[in-house]
Each structure stands twice: as structure tokens, then as C-alpha cells.
Image (spheres, rainbow, N blue to C red):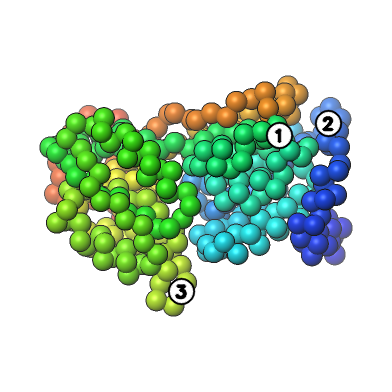
Amino acid sequence: MHSSRRRHFISAALGTAALVTLAKRPASAAPAAGLPRRILHVMSFDSPWRWTDGQFAGFKEGLGKVPAEFQIFQMDVKRNSSREAKARKGSEALALIEAWQPQLLYVSDDDAMEFVVRPLIGQHLPCVFSGVNKTPAEHGLDSAINVTGVLEREHFVESVRLLQNLVPGPLRLAALSDLGPQWPPIIERMRSTVSGLPGVSLSVVDRVRSFAEFKARLQSYPAVADAVVQLGIFALADTDGTNVPYQKVQKWACLNSHLPDISFWVDRVHHGVLASMAISELEQGRAAGRLARAILVEGKPPSALPIRSAVKGHPVINLARAKQLGLGMKSSLLLSSEVITHFPWEHDG
């Protein structure tokens, strides 16, 4: 067995206890000029997926021409959705850190923050994050001298205004989500900003555990709402207790709901949501990569690099969904947006 793989299995068996050793070690010495930096990327989700892959591509772009050796660890929380499963994947990532001793840890999204970065707060390993919804305080970062990164902030107001270009008039919005911990902060921000949108109200907010509940709530909305804000669809239990793939959830919603809908991520529009001023996964990653470069090349400590939000959005419209709903489309809107022309299942099989 290859020695690095053998070290990984040994460390995995030790679990998080190996962190005692890591905590006592001094920061890794900077590599000699020209030698690659070891960078571990822990994804909360999985690859291939545009959201995670785009963040990583943006990170490498922001890092620039820094010699680097990467390893990628996928927590795959869409499948490992229970707290116990997430904790297990977090322990595996921490064991890999102990075995490989990276010079920098880059994580994407909230679960990697909670189960991988949080145990490392105050230690020597510099950590950079992107795609994080919870506040720094919620992740315990108030005094985290070794952590910095980029917060994910949805473009709610801009997405609603994009929707109003397609569906003029007053809008009662219904927001629908699974029980994932990343969604409550988004819901609270929506509630706090909707009052600044004339003629728009957030009339219903539902968080559901199962696919059956999701279907029932979505089908009830025409009586109380004019449009749907689709949030979490990754952790909806099927009748046998397993998670329903989010693509299946999205397809069902598209084929069975006749209300226009928005979300905040480009892949949702690819899978049938009408429109989004999408959070740019590339901008999230680029901003994180620039922070990593400042740490690795300029020698700045993470504590000297403020946590920030990437503010640039990306308009996306699903033309197939617009035609399905009988909505007209201005040519100027199409020219200024990324346009999805078909549903993915139309080309399946």
C-alpha cells in the first residue's frame, strides 16, 4: 500500500483524537521557493456539480500562479444528510489533515465549516472558506485568528425584481425549504428585506422533512401565493427514509406547479426554476482564492484579512419554464441574462 494512503487509513482509525497532535504542532514551515503548497479542499457537497466545481475553479483562479498540490475531500452531505453522517465525514476530513499536513485548508459551504473548520479554530492551520450562509458568530469565528473567508449572500431583492420583469403586478411569495441548517439565516434575511419591495409580501414560509410534505405544500400555494421561492431540496426523505435526489424533486416541482418560481443558484434554473439573480460560484471562489494567496504568498495572517461577502450576482432565466407558464419575454432581458433553453430531462435517454 502506498505510504500516504496507509497514513490516511491509520489516521482515519484514530479519528478526531489525532487533532491533539495537530494542535500542538507549530505552523508548517513555508516550502522552499518553487515547491508547491499543499492545499486541501473540503467540499460540503460533491462533484461533479456546478456550485462546488465552480467555487473550486474560481479559487484556483484567485490563487493565481502559485505552485500548489491539491487534494479534494467530498463530504457529500446531500447523501450523508444526518448529523451523525456529517460528523463522520468531518472526522474523516480531519484525519486526512493530520495525515497530509496541508499548508492551507479551503472549505466550501456550511457543513464543512461546522464539522471540519470549527474543531481547528485557534490552531495553526490557516483556513479559508466560501459559500457560507451562517454568520461568523454562529460558526464561532469571533476570535478565530486562523480563519477567514467569503460569506454567501443570496440576491433576494434582485431575484424578485427579475421575477417582476416576467410577472408584473403585486406578488405574494411562498418560501419552501427542507430542514437543513443553512436555510434559516436566508429566511430571516428575506423577511428583513421584503418590506423594501413595494407590492411584494412573504406570505408563507414552510420547512418540511419529506418529499410527500414538499409536494403537498407546493400544491397548496395557488390559494395563498403568486410565486414560489424554492430553497432547500437536498434533504427530503422518501417513503423508505432515503433522500430523494434533488434533480427528481426539481423535476416534480416543474411538472406539477404552475406558479412562477425563483431560487438563488444557477443549477436550480438549469433544473427547472424560472429565474434567479444567482449567487456566482466563481466569484465566491475567486474571492477565497485571493485570500489564500495573501496568506501563502504575502505572508498575511488570516486575522488580518476581514471576512467579506461576494456581491456580484448573475441573472439566469429558464426559457423552457417561461414557455411552460405562458410568460412573455423581452429580448433585452434575454440578452442580458444567461438563458437555459430546455429542461434536462428532455434529453435523458
Which residue type carries mark 1? Asn
Say whether residue 278 is visible.
Answer: no
Q: Look at the numbered discs 2 and 1 and tell me whether their residues touch, using CB distance below 8 Å.
A: no
Mark 3 and mark 1 lie on one chain; the one further toward the N terminus is 1
Residue 303: quadrant of the picture:
top right
Question: Which numbered circle lies on residue 241?
Answer: 3
How far is disc 2 from disc 1 in space, using C-alphas?
16 Å
Residue shown at the point (40%, 32%) measured from the top left = 313
Residue pointed to by mark 2 = 30
x and y percentages locating residue 346 in the rendered image: 31, 60
How far is disc 2 from disc 3 in space, using C-alphas?
48 Å
For label 1, the SS is loop
Give above or below for 41 relative to 258. above
x and y percentages locating residue 310 in the rendered image: 48, 30
For label 3, the SS is loop
Mark 2 and mark 1 lie on one chain; the one further toward the N terminus is 2
Residue shown at the point (72%, 44%) measured from the top left = 120
Give above or below for 136 relative to 207. above
Question: Which numbered circle lies on residue 146?
Answer: 1
Query: 292 or 328, which lies in front?
Result: 292
Q: Nearer the viewer, mark 2 or mark 1?
A: 1
Left or right: where 25 falls relative to 113: right
Left or right: where 194 falls relative to 89: left
Query: 90 or 289, which lies in front?
Result: 90
Q: Residue furthest bottom?
A: 240
Left or right: where 163 falls relative to 210: left
Residue 299: quadrant of the picture:
top right
